[in-house]
Amino acid sequence: ELSQEQSKTAHERLRRLQELDDQPRTETKVPFILVELRGHAGHDSFIEICGKDEYGVYDSLHSWLQLEWGCQKLAAGDLSDDTPLPFCDAFYSWPYFQASSDEGLSNMGLATMRLVDFMCNQLSWTLGVVNGGNVGSKGEIREQQIIFKAPHPMNLVSPHVMVELRSAGYVEICGTDAGAVSTLRDYFADKFGGEVESGHEAFCDCCLRCANNVFKERGRSGENNVGHLTTQVCDAVVAMLPGWSLVTMNGGNYGADGTHREQQMVFRWDNHPLREAPHLLVELREAGYIEICGEDVGGFHGKLADWLKSEWGCKKPMVIPGQEPFCDLKLSWSPKDMMCASADLTAFFHGHGWQMQVCSQGTVHAKGKPDVREQQILFRPGSSAAGVVEPHVFLELYTGEGSEVLGNQRIRLREVGDCGAVLGELEKFFLEYLGGELDGQDDHGITSFSVDVFLSRGLTDNNLGCWTMRVCDFMVDRLGWSFVVCNVCNLGPGGRIREQQLVFRHDGERRDIPLVRPNNEVLDPAAFSGVQLPSYWRDEEVKALKKQRAMMICEQDEVQSIQEMFDATFKRVLTRDRVYEYQTSSSEEMPYRLEVVHAFRSENANLWLNFAQRRSSYKGGTVMRTKTQSAGSLLNSRLDAGEAYLAHGTNPSSAMAILKTGFVLANAGKATGTMFGYGIYLAECVSKSDEYARDDNGGTFPGLMAVLLCRSLVGNPYVVQDPGDAVPAAQASNCDSIIGDREAKVGTYREFVFFDERQVMPEFAVIYRRQYDSKSVPKFMRSSTLGTTGRNWQVQLDKGWGNVPPDVSLDLNKADQEGKAELERSVGEFLYIFNLKKKTQLNVATGNIRKIRAPMRK
């Protein structure tokens, strides 16, 4: 047991972390929560919850666990010195877990997906990772970590489904989307010879026993075809189920020798921008092989093989005549440190425009040895520009050996790309809050820290999940990095030694999103005397003033009306506020269309009361018509005189938060500046609002942006064309708002500025994606861009200066920064030589030379 002094030190560290959480911060908060399901058939099973209690998630989980699974809350300890040291933030018994037979049948997958359905579809939290391992002499104790991150509105309407491949001869499907389950059942019946097995309803939603020749394995090194089947299934799912993509993958091994392979894949309808891009799986096996499975896109197998041979000394193994290959490419290697190898491999793929999607690891008995590691890493092409290696940090938390107070604990770190100051911040965090000591850096660039924070009680109870969440909080919440994936490896006798690998990525600087006001308002029915709520509101409790607000999923006619408004107000006009977004199949600087994926409407009684009270003082006058009034008749029919729907670009999570509380005038300009004075800035053209919109980052519904459509009292506006603080003049003229008319001045857009936050009622959160393919939009929207961002290199054409393609401009900027004199670059079918000193462009084929010029700003 812990000594009194050790217990006091451990409690003090947790209290210091609480103080760190309470410090003020400027960046948007991104909470994480980890739910660990620990099942042991015929014995007590438990659930541990770790992470910050944001949005009332602990109370909601408590009620659901009791109601659905009959869980009972147990004592978890707290931060006072005289209590047991908490290993988690909430602790429950779990009588729901079931397992049967030696083939590894259990309801862990089903339980995982029921929890995912609740957390995502009801509470709107985002599934990040499903990560599991097996403990015990035969792996009979299942441990499943499910990590959720900040709520996102699309979770309310996005179904999930899990496919589990089990080498014992089964495919299990778990999910509540009947259409997806049916499509997958038919696929596995056709491709895997699967026959539906009855009597498995307690373990999954659909179980198929596969034909005898589907799952294959051979030899003493653990060779099998599960990796090959995995990529086949992933590619098939994104093709069969439009808009679906792989969210997380979890590989495990069951049985005394780890001979039964289990691969869980969770898919989600999220309209991922990579659409049907193929999956490539690389499996690093300490048994002496590297296996590559997946489509050979553009001859990439050869490039990867050449790199592996050059950098790692890999060789093609001898081909045995008549032996069926279990993968698409196989090489032998002298096994390296798994974290180091994974980091180097990630850097190689990113340098060729591929991005890591998921990774998982496990151990098997191979060649007579226990704990032979296997690491699977799945990549997809097209997530970044070729030659761009996004900064990554790989972390490894090793809990150490022994029991209770574990020895030989460590944290290891390896960077990919230029990680800048984050390494120093991490070192400070480990030393100050984890009691770490810097051991130094080895020849492979791995920095190691000795720590003593990992503790355990018995075979399964430990605090690894707690510290995993603390590291995630620090990297994401404090440093602004994105969490990519984590996976656990169980080592040693019974798998009691745990090693958690975490990967973080820096996705670039993002514009800060203004914080919303704390929701401290109460509903006072007496204040609504004489105030009529909108006739189209649907929530009966809000209409009866029994609750303050409700979030409604928009009906199809509302979504259609919003799309009409979007199309009518989209102009392909560039300004300096537009940031270039890399596209695999296009070099366009801005999209052709914004396609509405879904929309949510707020029925907020208090915000409506504020709006109605401000409107009552409106004196009327000459109505200023906005572009949004030219289309979307359903929405516009709801407006009164002097009102208009106007747009505000943001990210989805912030959009939902602002719907709840409204805009805060005190935060005006913190994200985008104040060109015309202090106020809330809206636009009549969604193409202007789109300049400030972004997704939620970190792989959370990537490529889905948000615009708030706000019911706004424009009233009598004060119109200006030049920048400057126009608020005093507008107020002195008794005007209701300001219009900054840069459209009349320079041909761009009109912006609307409100200096009374009551005049702006955010009503719709519109989730959309950018469409860069001109063939996929209506003909009237297939126009060329006007204006400039001022960020691109330009070439002097016969009719004036024009932008070079944005990806070429990025390469020219990089070459210029590196002091290079020339750059060779293909554009279409032509090869050009750019002379950065002479500022010329040479067409090698024609010999034609044109002048080029650098961006106005970089």
Image (spheres, helix red, strand yellow):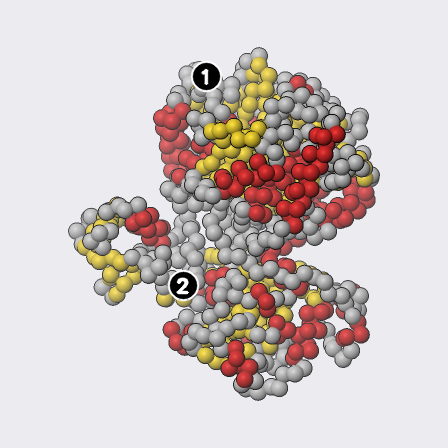
Residue 488, percent from left and from top: 61, 30
Q: How many neighbours does mark 2 have within 10 angstroms: few (below 14), some (14-19), or many (20 or more)? A: few
Percent from the top left, x then y, of residue 606? 71, 69
Viewer-nearest residue: 664 or 104: 664
Looking at the picture, which amino acid does disc 2 mark? Arg
Q: Mark 1: which amino acid?
A: Gly
- Compared with residue 146, is residue 678 higher up or lower down, i.e. above or below? below
Residue receiving disc 2: 576
The answer to whether 406 is drawn above or below residue 579 in the figure is above
Circle 1 sits on which residue? 322
* Residue furthest front as drawn: 5
Can you tell which quarter of the image residue 299 is in? top left
Residue 352, position as x, y percentages in the image: 39, 39
Please state if 454 lies on the left or on the right of 271 as rendered: right
Instruction: Say which residue appears at 47% left-offset and 43% top-offset.
Output: 421
Instruction: Out of 497 and 631, give the one closest to the viewer.
Output: 497
Depicted 747 relative to depicted 590: above or below: below
Residue 299 in view in this figure: yes
Q: Nearer the viewer, residue 646 or 22?
A: 22
Q: Residue at x 49, y 29 (%)?
A: 440
Which marked residue is nearer to the observer: mark 1 or mark 2? 2
Dot 1 and dot 2 residues touching (CB under 8 Å): no
Determine which quarter of the picture holds residue 396. Answer: top right
Q: Is residue 33 in sight in this rendering? A: no
Residue furthest out toward the top: 368
